[in-house]
Image (cartoon, helix red, strand yellow):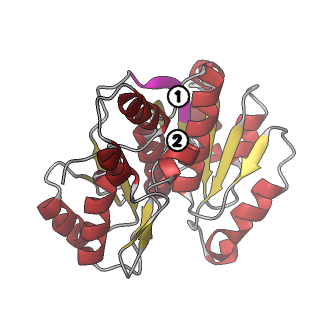
Amino acid sequence: MRRHEIDAKHLEDLLLQVQRGQMEVREAVERLRILPYEDMGFAKIDHHRALRNGFPEVVYAPGKSPEQLAHIAQRIVETSSRVLITRAGPEAYARVREALPDARYSELARAIVVNRGEKKAPPVSGVLIAAAGTADLPVAEEAAVTAELMGNEVERIWDVGIAGVHRLLEHLPNLRKARVIVGVAGMEGALPSLIGGLVSVPVIAVPTSVGYGASLQGLAALLAMLNACSPGIAVVNIDNGFGAGYLAGMINLSAAGASRE
């Protein structure tokens, strides 16, 4: 099946083609047939989401078989230039790649990505992601992969936790140039508070489940971030790198006046 991307620009182009007599009404109806969603039996794909939100539906891999993920990815890519599957293992990637040979896999982020729109426009700089420790990198990289797929250029600063605060301060000029910062930390979750006291841009705090017993699988870091003294900090759920990367991407693109479509 030929792929027809569904976003605001392509929808406008489609309607203009009908208006000019360059496309039959029947063909336009067929392209719009799957709006607002497509029922696959085991999943209902929201093809309308890119039109509403500027980014296609993202697939959460746990609980889905590799075959289901491959089928879902195939259907999404027929109406979108981008596919993102989060928390996926190598077996799922192998099956998706059989169906979509241009799929790429980030082992660190556990993310499967298809990006056929890379040449549309240069990425928009302004997102910086800071990870407190090496153990926090899977969550931090998930945030980075998500923001990049949305069309953002991401700067990564790894292993800058407060146990060695001079490591973070070395990057202060970069922190102050960013439009939005994602701070990823486990243990006591103090990194976003420190960053928030140094910059005048939004900081998105991501608690991770890294830490010893009393960290309670990230609950201690989550509560610390929710009680942060520094202003301008928003907090996402434990280990939710995707949510942080998506929010950072939206903020950066909006601040830059760029389109997400």
Query: Could you tell me residue 169's position as x and y percent?
Result: 63, 28
Left/right of residue 11 with respect to residue 81 in the rendered view: right
The answer for how far apart the CA atoms under marks 1 and 2 are is 8 Å
Mark 2: amino acid: Gly
Of the 4 image quadrants, the one containing the N terminus is: bottom left
Q: Nearer the viewer, residue 189 or 246?
A: 246
Which label number is shown at residue 120? none
Q: Nearer the viewer, residue 21 or 9?
A: 21
- Magenta span of residues: 122-128
Mark 1: amino acid: Ser
Q: Nearer the viewer, residue 38 or 97?
A: 38
Left/right of residue 100 with respect to residue 170 in the rendered view: left
Q: Residue at x 65, y 63 (%)?
A: 237
Do we see residue 166 in this rendering?
Answer: no
Q: Residues within 10 Å of mark 1 (few under 14, many from 20)?
A: few
Answer whether residue 64 is magenta in the image: no
Answer whether residue 126 is magenta in the image: yes
Is 226 situated above or below 167?
below
Looking at the image, is mark 1 or mark 2 earlier in the sequence?
Answer: 2
Residue denoted by label 2 = 54
Q: Residue at x 76, y 54 (%)?
A: 225
Do we see residue 101 in this rendering?
Answer: yes
Query: Could you tell me residue 123's position as x and y percent?
Result: 42, 25
Q: Determine contact: label 1, label 2, CB under 8 Å.
A: yes
Left/right of residue 92 with respect to residue 42 in the rendered view: left
Residue denoted by label 1 = 259
* Secondary structure that dominates the magenta span: strand
Q: Secondary structure at mark 1?
A: loop
